[in-house]
Image (cartoon, grey):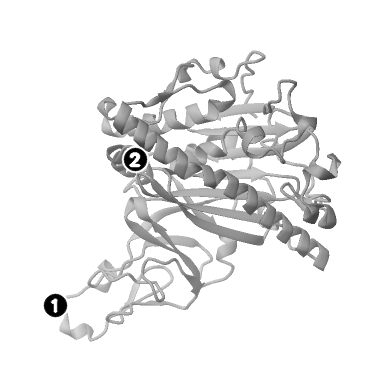
Amino acid sequence: MTDWPKPAAGSWTEHYPDLGTGPMSFEDSVSPEFYELERTAIFERAWLNIGRVEQLPRVGSYFTKEIAIARTSILVVRGRDQEVRAFHNVCRHRGNKLVWSEFPREEVSGTCRQFTCKYHGWRYGLDGGLNFVQQEGEFFGLDKGEFGLVPVHCEIWAGFVFVNLAPEPPQTLTEFLGPMVGALADYPFDRMTERYDFKAENASNWKLFADAFQEYYHVPGLHSQQVPGAVRKPDNGFTCAHYQLDGPHRMVSTGGARRWTLPPEFMYPIERVTRSGLVGPWESPDIGELPPGINPGRIDPWGIDNFQIFPNVEILFYRGWYLIYRYWPTSHNTHTFEGTLCYQPADSVRKRIEHEVSSVVFKEFALQDAGMLTGTQTALEQAYRTAGITDYPVNDQEILVRHFHKAVADWVGAFHGAAAR
């Protein structure tokens, strides 16, 4: 495992001098022009996680993914050879969307033997090949071998399905993920197949919601119930135990008192009754020895690891379960937020209730974060347009926010030139 540098006590940001310590600009979160640059520099070149292999349990299983910022729809399917493939979701005849249900912009999933276009009946195999053309003889020298579905680069890492929309990806998926994220590969993701999915449209730039989960400086103010005095610093604050950067990716570890050891007034009544809540079931199942990538700072007592995989996915590791966030931009000031909680399948009614309570309490705290963001977006835009304010002070606990926006700027600058920064 890589020996990560340990910063001097009291400072993380200064250990990474390329980040700087001065005020940082949030112009990238209010500018329509910068959003257009992100489209081509990041979302059409980076590896994007669009799902898990559990969504494709058998031959013919498929799902679609709408990627608005890339102006495309992706079809992912498990073929007869068990391989997972991705294609642009468009019929090669006259460009109709191939797989959809009642509304073309809604994502769908299911199982089939082949894909049939609703418009003129062209049929495609699970490998993307064109198998049937209605009234084929009326076409002029049509070679079906040249008109299969257009493939998209697709790779699997630890059961996560990634796609890359570039004609030739700048890096392989393994190279892109790097050693810090790669060290998570042996985590038993495949055992946690009980899922609770949430999706919401949010009136803020996609980076602002990611920022909300990359720092815990806001916790005492916004989630005062979550961080009572027992785990605060003497000055009434809350600090995390470990930060780490690797290429465009970043992570943070929290420690502190277990929620169930706190006084009852710091819990919802339903948490006390069901012995489950924000951090999951109090009696989490044993999942064996954790891979070295978890809790890289070796924090004791350890609480949560939050890994942010560039550009728009986060994986949060709790004790015995994990959580996925994804942020899909839809404009310079709107995005779609997805949250998925993943547990080992419940083998009793009580465990199922514990999982459902945990998912509901999670949603409550996520709404507290989401509720701030329209105000943040609105104020940033007003300050930018009326007063020309772009720069804001950022503290040491917000190192991941600083790093994230720099990574975005670096990708945009590398692709479009320094003038785009």
What residue is drawn where x is 46% and y is 38%?
376
Q: Quadrant of residue 353?
A: bottom right
Quarter containing the N terminus: top right
What residue is drawn where x is 75% and y is 45%?
319
In 3D space, how far apart are the residues under numbered discs 2 and 1 (Cα atoms)?
Answer: 41 Å
Of marks 2 and 1, the one in the foreground: 2
Residue 256 position (above or below residue 150): above
From the top left corner, tell me how far across and down residue 417 is, in percent.
27, 29
The mark nearer the N terminus, 2 or 1, is 2
Give the SS element for disc 1: loop
Q: Amino acid at mark 1?
A: Phe
Direction from residue 311 to residue 343 in the image, left or right = right
In this rendering, the count of numbered labels is: 2
What residue is drawn where x is 66% and y is 40%?
223
Q: Residues within 10 Å of mark 2 (few under 14, many from 20)?
A: many
Quarter containing the C terminus: top left
From the top left corner, tell me how far across and down residue 3 is, in percent.
64, 23
The residue closer to the viewer here, 355 or 172, is 355
From the top left corner, tell me how far across and down residue 76 is, in percent.
45, 63
Q: Amino acid at mark 2?
A: Glu
Q: Quadrant of residue 11?
A: top right
Give the SS element for disc 2: helix
Q: What residue is disc 1 on?
A: 140
What residue is drawn where x is 54% and y is 72%?
59
Task: Please report contact status of discs 2 and 1: CB closer than 8 Å, yes or no.
Answer: no
Q: Is residue 268 visible?
A: yes
